[in-house]
Amino acid sequence: MKEIDWSKLGFHYTEPDYIVRSAYHEGVWEEPYATKDKFLHLHVSATCLQYGQEAFEGLKAFRGVDGKIRIFRWRENAKRMARSAEGLYMAPVPEEIFGKAIHLALEKNMDFVPPYGTGATLYFRPLLIGTTPRLGVGPGRDFEFIVIPSPIGPYYPGKFHCTTFVVNRHVDRAAPYGTGTFKVGGNYASSFRATEPAHAQGMDCLFLDAKYHRYIDECSAANFIGIKKLSAVSHQPSEIEYLTPRSSAILPSITNDSLMTLARDKGYKVTRRHIRLEELEQMSEAAACGTACVISPIDKVIDPEKNKIYHLSDQPEPILTDLYHSLKDIQYGRAEDRHGWCEVIE
Ligand SMILES: Cc1ncc(COP(=O)(O)O)c(C=O)c1O
């Protein structure tokens, strides 16, 4: 085990011993191999540099209460990366190559899997880039798939807490039917104009749909969830609605998919539809969700242009707090994995 203060890591890159690489030439993927070399010998005209032919992923391995390592739903990340690849006219990485690379990255960096109880995890950043040199606008024919592992600290080193979001109508994250549904670097670079000013004020950014600026799209780099109580008197689970946006411009979050399944298991009504910003007034709880945080509860949403503040709650509320713990319990092996989401490494 490495001498690392796991609780102080934060979401920062810690140099692993090995990364894993596999190149694609003439229609064939090379067998993934581990290397200590963290640099690429890349042509200056490679399509990833010239035309943004790049896609990435993010997933985690957890050291469980039983000491075993669990990789969470990596096949879903493999499928999403294949969709992103097709969306940018790149060769999709076959699930077999993706799986081999993740497992090899884990095997070669076992010392970087944080111990149970620290809240830290081993994060994998799979990356796919176009490497063909091209001057004329168009896609490449050669690609490189890389898995970069890095231990990361707990998202909540202190208390599970809320974040404030701010609406920005001057910057759109992604166009309807654009690349928002793919996990590609360009979506993030083009969001910085909105996310960086929000971060500078200690907040995060809530993106509305780009066409009407009426519906909630995404929370920065996470999906949005709202909880509505359907009855003022009954507290039956069937009177609780888990709401999440339907949009052609958002990334299909694997965490959101898992939370929706858990919400259904608990008897809640799960609805995916267009959600107007004003509907925040009818929600008892709201949150951002994604691999990094699982759930990040929202205390308020500020809409500066309309001079409006939607107040939710100053502290995390029970329904989303319970869902947060339910998913984390599965990831850490404290609860039965009824849906077979974790691959347990013996
Ligand atoms: C734009 C965006 N939306 C949503 C998510 C959450 O997805 P997941 O739960 O698969 O991490 C992410 C993070 O990957 C993201 O970058």
Image (tube, helix red, strand yellow):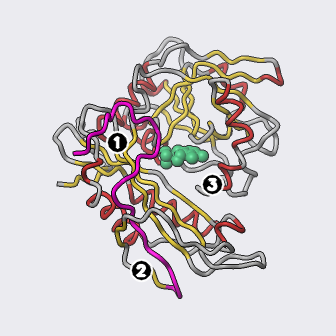
Q: Residue 188, which numbered label?
A: none
Which badge, 3 or 2, is on the more N-terminal residue?
Answer: 2
Front-most of 63 and 215?
63
The amino acid on which the numbered mark 2 sits, given as a three-letter code, is Glu
In this rendering, position of residue 317 left or right of residue 191? left
Mark 1 → mark 3, Cα distance in angstroms: 26 Å
Residue 321's place in the image compared with 21, above or below, is above
Image quadrant where one finds the N terminus: top left
User: Does the stretch in magenta take in 256?
Assistant: no
Q: What stretch is highlighted in magenta?
A: 1-27
Secondary structure beneath label 3: loop
Q: Residue 181, which numbered label?
A: 3
Secondary structure beneath label 1: strand
Mark 3 → mark 2, Cα distance in angstroms: 28 Å
Secondary structure beneath label 2: loop
**Residue 10 x, y percent position in the rendering:** 44, 35
Q: Does the residue labelled 1 lie within 8 Å of ligand 1?
A: no
Image quadrant where one finds the C terminus: bottom left
| Residue contact at pointers 1 and 3, CB within 8 angstroms | no
Residue drawn where x is 42% and y is 24% of the image = 321
Front-most of 228 and 194?
194
Residue drawn where x is 47% and y is 48% of the image = 254
- Asked if residue 253 can be seen in this view, the reply is no
